[in-house]
Image (cartoon, grey):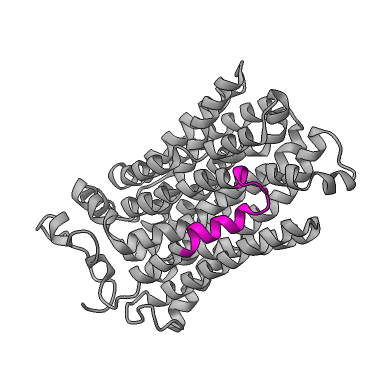
Amino acid sequence: MTNKIEQLVIATVGFFWAFLLWFSTAAFSPSIGAFYGLTTGQLALLASSAIWLAPPGRVFAGWAADRLGAHNVFAVILAYSGLMSIASSFATSYEVLFVERLVVASAGVGFVVGIQHVAQWFDEHEIGTAEGLYAGTGNAGAGVGALVLPRVYGTNFSDAFLHLGVVALLIAVVYKWRGEPARDAETAATARRNASLGDTLFVWTRYAAIGLMLAYAMSFGLEIAMNSWLPSYYAEGFDGAIGDLGFAGTAAVQTAAGTFAAVQSFNASLFRPFSGYVSDLWQRKGWTPYPFLATERAYSPRVHWLLTALVLIVLAMASLTLAGLAGVLPVSVVVLAAFGITVSFGTGGVFAIVPVLFDERPGTASGFIGGVSTSGGIVYPLVYGYVPNIHTGYAVVAAVFFVPFVLFFVWAMRREGDPREHGIGSASRWLSDDGQSPSPAGGDD
């Protein structure tokens, strides 16, 4: 008999492999760059391209999960990205490879499908931990790619792309076979019913949803930017230090750089379930330390935990720049490890709130918040690659993007009333008068 643990496992395995597909290009970026003679700027563009299809793709995939069922949508994503990964192993030019890997990278849109899937099976008091386990374990795919793939395949990225694609097809079959859309027919029907254009526009125009999207842009959007960028960063920014450690040649440098890069990815993944648990803990304890944020909503403690995470991310970005400018590789790696933990606090904190705040529209909300936010993964690597000093990009991103994001999040979450009533247009403007208005998430206006 189908149960929620089985569905959590299916969603997690699917997302793990989707994430591995997504960032397998980054794992081989030094060897791809050497093979095709790419410049640092071109490597930054290649890193950025992994995210190009994520913003619109996640928005659509989240809506489709509500409308068609997560098991159907995720199976399709794994199937087409697996087939394209296989095709990319036979690419005859860099231009063909670039386009095919662009499509493969869209496997990352599966994240919001799994978020919706898990939300349809777990209750509010355990949602933070469940979503953290799903997303954290799945995110580890990037770290596995950076750490394992270069060691197994060396510079032979074609064989790696082939084998990854074949496994993706097998997982797609299992997801379709064993996956169920929700714990009961009524839950699935509610999600389908609330997947109209009006419901979508309602979510997109809520200030709280925008604030959560920005919070995810400076946590997960940052994480995927770093997954794409870090192998190139360490290969270029610490080439002398890596050479002093005895790594010579493209394959050796790629392995070393991938190992350092994996530190961030593994910590961002492994601590994400912990962040979800901490969000649940703050919720149970009723901790609301910040007087400028709402304290009366049923989920207010989760908002306060998330703000703590966002502040830590800003501080970690500044620390990365300082460590890079100091030119001490061990210090940079230690700071990167702490950085990964702060990122996990942000990612876990966001999706401990989203399914609670938008419980009747989990896919649509996850698609918007988890989709538009990935634009950061496009923009940040370009900043990193084109600032005059390769180490200063982190501080630039923190000052130009993250500080304003935090301020908007605080502004959006400061009201004691239901935040879903605050946005561009009222709920009654976007939603039909058939009982579909947002249910209160604790407290009264």
Query: Residue at the front extreme?
Result: 388
Q: Which portion, as a residue range, is magenta?
A: 384-403
Q: How many marks?
A: 0
Query: Residue at the left extreme?
Result: 433
Q: Does 421 appear above or below 174? A: below
Query: Residue at the top extreme?
Result: 92
Q: Does 30 appear above or below 224? A: above
Question: Which is nearer the eye, 433 or 123?
Answer: 433
Seen at 40% across and 84% down, the residue is 291
- Report the quarter where the C terminus lies: bottom left
Q: Is residue 121 visible in the rendered structure shown here?
A: no
Q: Is residue 241 left or right of residue 17?
A: right
Give the x, y percent position of residue 37.
Answer: 70, 25
Give the x, y percent position of residue 159.
Answer: 68, 26
Question: Which is nearer the eye, 391 or 104?
Answer: 391
Seen at 34% across and 41% down, the residue is 60
Asked whether 380 falls inside the magenta stretch, the response is no
Q: Give the prevailing secondary structure in the magenta stretch.
A: helix
Question: Which is nearer the eye, 6 or 69?
Answer: 69
Give the x, y percent position of residue 146.
Answer: 68, 43
Asked whether 392 falls inside the magenta stretch, the response is yes
Seen at 77% across and 32% down, the residue is 154
Q: Is residue 373 left or right of residue 311?
A: left
Q: Is residue 442 left or right of residue 168?
A: left
